[in-house]
Amino acid sequence: MASSFNPNDDTIAAVATPPGDGGIAVIRLSGPESVDILRSIFKPGSAEENPHFSPRMLYHGHIIDPESESKVDEVLAVYMKSPASYTGEDVVEIHSHGGHVVPKKILDLIFRLGARPANPGEFSLRAFLNGKMDLAQAEAVADIVNAQTEDALKQAELQLEGALSNKILEIKNIILDILAEVEARVDFPEEDIDPIVKSALVSRTQDILAGLETLLGTYREGRILKYGVSTAIIGKPNVGKSSLLNRLVMKERAIVSPVPGTTRDFIEESIDIRGIPLRLVDTAGIRITGDEIERTGVALAKKKAGEAELIIAVIDGSAPLDDDDYEVLEGLQGKQAILAVNKADAGFSISQGGLLEHSPAERIVHTSAKTGIGIENLKDAVSALLRGNSRRAEAGEVVLTELRHKLAIEKASESLSSFLKLLDAGESPEFLALDLRMALDSLGEITGEVTTEDVLGRIFSKFCVGK
Ligand SMILES: Nc1nc2c(ncn2[C@@H]2O[C@H](COP(=O)(O)OP(=O)(O)OP(=O)(O)O)[C@@H](O)[C@H]2O)c(=O)[nH]1
Ligand SMILES: [Mg+2]
């Protein structure tokens, strides 16, 4: 472990709740001075003169500025003694009133008394460095905070409980066994490995490789769970894009009107479709126009369509297609796209055959944003397209959500494949051991046994302050 962090020698503090309006805020301290700092600013509400602060007891009182002796706020405070705390250090949490002013005033007092502002993720970094959790678990903490859907939350909770870490540990233990077998032969490099032992090593390694392959296959689902899917609703003006967005998010979010060119700016909303978080963007209707503002909107719509991972293209099925529609349809080439043939309530006047030139049948859905017809089919089509052939993870099954983990597993697989090749070629045990060690190191990166300051910096800086 990188020792230059010296995690334990100073005391950090931050407001752990989001800024802004709120009934209460939680100010958190971690480090050796935490309790002393609390003692110097806390005056108990009851007769008790100078509270002893028994661990895990909630104390009611006031925060007092020790210089001016003025009351800052009425609070509850709790002390969690090292090592039985989130960070493994002495931790104090002060529950103050919320808002912008009070928590900041208390925090400033705390800084005056010697604590320093915590960096993003620094509480979790300390928890990791103090062995309270491994790196994959620390990353799961951030995922819990950032989860957009129930499924994403469940997955993050699984990983925080150690589901991924345990799986990696199991695999590492098997590799360690294989390594022990191989190393036992290092002193006899001229002797060939017994064919029976050799075939056992091969089959065990192949089993591990198959397990790693299965895990890698979950990344598509994991990524979707974690990051959501950027989705642009596009189409020519007046086909019902904004109506469709409103229908999907179940509120009057975007302005709808019979005037073509109503939406100019883009409107973004997050929704949960069959457990998949979508970041849905409604855009201006795409057409050639003399209006400068609308033209800017059209350019923005095309940009959003270009960036989106998924497109929901909308056409008005009750009117014949025109050039503006064809421009939209032609833009779908090579894209993940669903075609919503909207206004299904108002009759149908385009040829289904013509549409099939632009989209496979299973991606064409007839909808009415007005009545709600076909909306469930649209959700099914989106979910089927995004999940593709990838199997949906069963409840309780761990999936890969982190690119970092995926890359580490790929590296480990490469090393194990190389080990198999060298074993087959009758290479000396020393060389074989090298590949096995590399595989172990790669897997160790996931849980943080093998890591660098740089990697830690990158991981924890993505956290919020106070976590
Ligand atoms: N009959 C019927 N009318 C619809 C449907 N969806 C939308 N409309 C109507 O079509 C008109 C345009 O709807 P919008 O949702 O504003 O269309 P848009 O594609 O966002 O239009 P722009 O923002 O101008 O590009 C409105 O009068 C809607 O009430 C539908 O499914 N059926
Ligand atoms: Mg609109």
Image: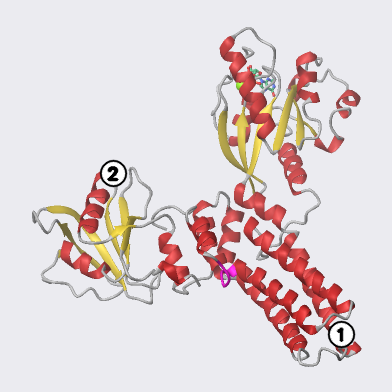
Q: Residue at x 36, y 57 (%)?
A: 118
Q: Is residue 347 visible?
A: no
Q: Is residue 391 magenta?
A: no
The residues colored magenta run 447-451
- Looking at the image, residue 390 sits to the left or right of residue 60; the answer is right
Where does label 1 land, which residue? 198
Give the answer, above or below, for where 101 lies relative to 44: above
Q: Position of residue 405 (x, y in %)?
A: 64, 61
Q: Element type at marker 2?
A: loop
* Disc number lying in front (2 or 1): 1
Where does label 2 land, which residue? 100
Answer few, some or many: residues within 10 Å of disc 1's Cα (few below 14, many 20 plus, some between 14 and 19). Answer: some
- Looking at the image, residue 5 sits to the left or right of residue 344; the answer is left
What kind of residue is marked 1?
Lys
- Looking at the image, residue 206 sits to the left or right of residue 130; the answer is right
Q: Is residue 448 magenta?
A: yes
Give the answer, above or below, for where 198 lies relative to 237: below
